[in-house]
Image (tube, grey):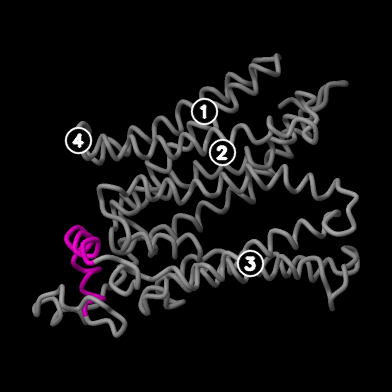
Amino acid sequence: GQLGNDNSLSCYCKDDNKWCFNEGNFTNDKDTCDDITTNGNECNVDSYLGVLIILRILMGLFESVTFPALYGLLNYWTTPSERSRMIGISFAGMYVGNIAGFPLSSFIIASDSKIYGGWPNVFYFFSLMGITWWIVWCFLISDSPFVDRFISPKELILLKSELPAALTKKFNKHKDSHYDDEFDDNDKKESSSKITVNWREFLTHRAALVLYLTHFSYNWSFYTLLVELPKYLSQELDYDLSSAGFVSVLPYLSQFVVTIIGSAFIDLLIVKNILSRTNARKTAQTIGTIIPGILLCVCGYLSKPSYVVALLSTATALMGMVNSGFAANYSDVSPTLSSVMYGIGNTIGTFPGVISPILSGIILSSSKSSNKGPEW
């Protein structure tokens, strides 16, 4: 789904990034409801295991278009001087989901209420939240500033002056454009030009390959922490996550804060010419990968839970800097087709989500010591 986002699925050629993003999230919310119901009744997981698996696959397929579509939207709504901040804020929303989702899910599951208690209501609650978001998105969001109903002429002129010409020309004669008068005749004559996708360059260029490798590496650490961190806190550190919920969300809360502040800081370094854009991205990526890697290694030699939690939280927090590193670099390398490039990179970066939990399970199960459980 990600590979075809800007070409096969026509999100790019028809300028429908808004609806691709919308469809991916709405279908995912609907399928989440369907996950636990069949013909309006709560399903027996053993009886409907095949249906459950199919629905989960469909959720992943439809949701796969959301990140490439997000980049397609940011291409039009983000100037180079604020790119780190916009991408950082967008990705920080994922951490808010982790912060709110885990404790809220635990509360709903543990509740004895006949109205909102029990595990099925977790799916219903988040699905209804997503559908509510979908309604708001439909009315407020536009594919580009050139067809937006709420944008001011001043902001429109600013975006047109800073965005790549290939993007602005696509909308100069758009049937819904409200500001055709802002464009000159030469722009209008060239507005029918198309941006072609050079797949060979996307798959073989050195800069693209480095981005894909970096994306893969980061996702490996992200998925490993996402899956194994709760187990580590409960099994190795004897934390009761139901009563110490703040400990389980502290790493993601820290990551949210660092992502927001760090992205603004990186943009400041670029705007003030303290660092070149390339060096700023390298700095952010180094802070977000090398230092967390060192801290995670140190955690393996500590036995005091408070020290381990502190280092884990610091490592996870610093990982938020990668949103100003490789994540923002997609738009630097390909300002007009970053959605295509990110789709390829995120497809490659999805494999750690499958491989990492399996490999972690093999390592932990094969290294059990006498009565102390697996060697984390």
Q: CA distance from mark 4 to mark 1?
A: 30 Å
Q: Answer above or below: position of 361 versus 83.
A: above
Mark earlier in primary sequence (2, 4): 2
Question: Which residue has dot 2 on it?
Answer: 221
Labels 2 & 4 near each other (Cβ < 8 A): no
Mark earlier in primary sequence (2, 1): 2
Q: Answer above or below: position of 342 versus 220.
A: below
From the viewer's side, name the closer residue of 37 and 141: 141
From the viewer's side, name the closer residue of 147 and 352: 147
Q: CA distance from mark 1 to mark 3?
A: 33 Å
Labels 3 & 4 near each other (Cβ < 8 A): no
Label at residue 252: none
Labels 2 & 1 near each other (Cβ < 8 A): yes
Q: Which residues are magenta?
A: 153-172
Residue 31 within the segment the image draws in magenta: no
Q: Answer above or below: position of 21 versus 274.
A: below
Q: Disc 3 residue type?
A: Asn
Question: Which residue has dot 3 on it?
Answer: 28
Residue lying at the far bottom of the rendered structure = 175
Question: Which residue has dot 4 on it?
Answer: 272
Labels 2, 4: front one: 4
Prevailing secondary structure class for the magenta stretch in the rendered image: helix
Q: CA distance from mark 2 to mark 3?
A: 25 Å
**Kind of element beneath mark 4:** loop
- Residue beneath the point at 24% across and 65% down: 156
Residue 171 within the segment the image draws in magenta: yes
**Kind of element beneath mark 2:** helix
